[in-house]
Image: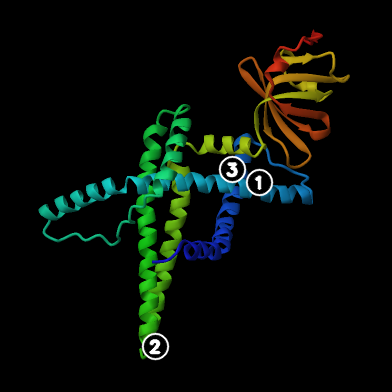
């Protein structure tokens, strides 16, 4: 039986390769997500400097990490309830074979249950509860997505086992014909392509069918401080005049020609020379791009709302 030190050393040796694989997956997903978020708010950052590009990569990695954790938690939920999934699947196969002339055999095997999935499942339940407060359909959509993810993960593992079997068989055969080698290589390449497509399915299914992709985007941008849902902003003229006059105030300690908007939404900041803000005006939201040197942004504070006002500017 292996000692704890041997197991720990094994994980430490494999850690760099796992981190590299994680980064290769997280950065493209994060970059694509930031682009999709830019489409949602109708703004694309421009005049990016080298430091902005570096920060963009860091932000892409940050959001990609959040997305991978989101997918992993839903997959953990699927693995956690996998005994029930396998039981239902066996009953369905049994019923089909009972009334069918030809016996149906599954092409893939289900992934085994693992007790560590309970930890990820707990996080998945928290996410489902959190996102379900905004959209009640998420209470059943995300659990169904978890089941679908488990099925795709089982197929992914099955492809890996078949590829390994092909590779082992190829190394064990000493003498073989060229045509046999070509067929074996073609089968292995086909399995590898199907394995990649299955992995893409695992990564995309929660965002295409989960119903929480918009909320996940917004909340991830809040975590990365690209978006601030409730902020106190100071805006200098002439940009202040383009926002709602009904929502602007001027306090005794505010600079000249600067006006305050409490409870504004900062949709995009931190990259490039502009920030995008949204201020409510009646039933509409006024969205405006403001140069960073014409705006001061700070986190929302309840104290700001009750600070004595010098005057309300109409």
Whether residue 8 sits left or right of residue 243 in the image: it is left
Whether residue 77 sits left or right of residue 46 in the image: it is left
Label 1 or label 2, whichever lies nearer to me, is 1
The local crowd at label 3, few if under 14, some if 14 to 19, many if 20 or more residues have their Cα within 10 Å, is some
Residue in the picture at 38% in, 54% down: 152
The secondary structure type at the circle numbered 3 is: helix
The secondary structure type at the circle numbered 2 is: helix
> Most extreme residue toward the bottom, as rendered?
175
The local crowd at label 2, few if under 14, some if 14 to 19, many if 20 or more residues have their Cα within 10 Å, is few
| N-terminal-most mark, 3 or 1 | 3
**Residue of label 3:** 36
Residue in the picture at 37% in, 89% down: 174
Contact flag, marks 3 and 1 (Cβ < 8 Å) = no
How much space separates mark 3 and mark 1, taking CA atoms? 14 Å
How much space separates mark 3 and mark 2, taking CA atoms? 48 Å
| N-terminal-most mark, 1 or 2 | 1
* Relative depth, front residue between 242 and 57: 57
Where does the image place residue 220, in percent across and percent down from the top left?
A: 59, 39
How much space separates mark 1 and mark 2, taking CA atoms? 50 Å
Residue in the picture at 75% in, 43% down: 46
Residue 247 figure quarter: top right
Where does the image place residue 26, in percent across and percent down from the top left?
A: 57, 52
* Relative depth, front residue between 222 and 245: 222
Residue 310 figure quarter: top right
**Residue of label 1:** 59
The secondary structure type at the circle numbered 1 is: helix
Rendered image: mark on residue 184: none
Query: Does 6 appear above or below 60?
Result: below
**Residue of label 2:** 178
Contact flag, marks 3 and 2 (Cβ < 8 Å) = no
**In the picture, which quadrant includes the N terminus?**
bottom left
Query: Does 243 appear above or below 51?
Result: above
């Amino acid at each position: 039986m292996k000692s704890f030190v041997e197991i720990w050393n094994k994980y430490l040796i494999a850690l760099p390769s796992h981190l590299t694989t994680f980064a290769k997956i997280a950065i493209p997903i994060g970059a694509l997500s930031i682009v999709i978020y830019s489409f949602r708010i109708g703004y694309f950052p421009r005049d990016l400097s080298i430091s902005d590009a570096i920060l963009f990569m860091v932000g892409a990695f940050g959001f990609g990490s959040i997305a991978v954790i989101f997918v992993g938690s839903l997959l953990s939920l699927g693995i956690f309830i996998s005994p029930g999934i396998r039981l239902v699947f066996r009953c369905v196969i049994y019923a089909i074979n009972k009334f069918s002339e030809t016996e149906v055999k599954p092409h893939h095997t289900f992934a085994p249950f693992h007790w560590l999935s309970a930890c990820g499942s707990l996080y998945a339940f928290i996410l489902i509860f959190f996102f379900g407060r905004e959209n009640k359909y998420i209470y059943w959509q995300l659990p169904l997505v978890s089941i679908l993810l488990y099925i795709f993960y089982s197929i992914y593992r099955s492809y890996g086992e078949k590829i390994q079997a092909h590779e082992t068989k190829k190394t064990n055969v000493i003498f073989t014909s060229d045509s046999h080698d070509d067929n074996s290589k073609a089968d292995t390449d086909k399995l590898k392509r199907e394995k990649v497509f299955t992995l893409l399915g695992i990564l995309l299914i929660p965002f295409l069918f989960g119903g929480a992709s918009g909320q996940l985007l917004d909340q991830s941008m809040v975590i990365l401080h690209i978006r601030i849902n409730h902020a106190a902003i100071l805006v200098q003229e002439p940009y202040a005049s383009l926002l709602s006059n009904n929502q602007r105030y001027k306090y005794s300690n505010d600079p000249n020609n600067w006006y305050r908007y409490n409870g504004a939404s900062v949709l995009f900041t931190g990259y490039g020379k502009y920030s995008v803000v949204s201020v409510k005006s009646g039933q509409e939201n006024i969205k405006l791009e403001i140069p960073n040197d014409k705006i001061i942004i700070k986190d929302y504070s309840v104290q700001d709302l009750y600070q004595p006002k010098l005057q309300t500017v109409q």
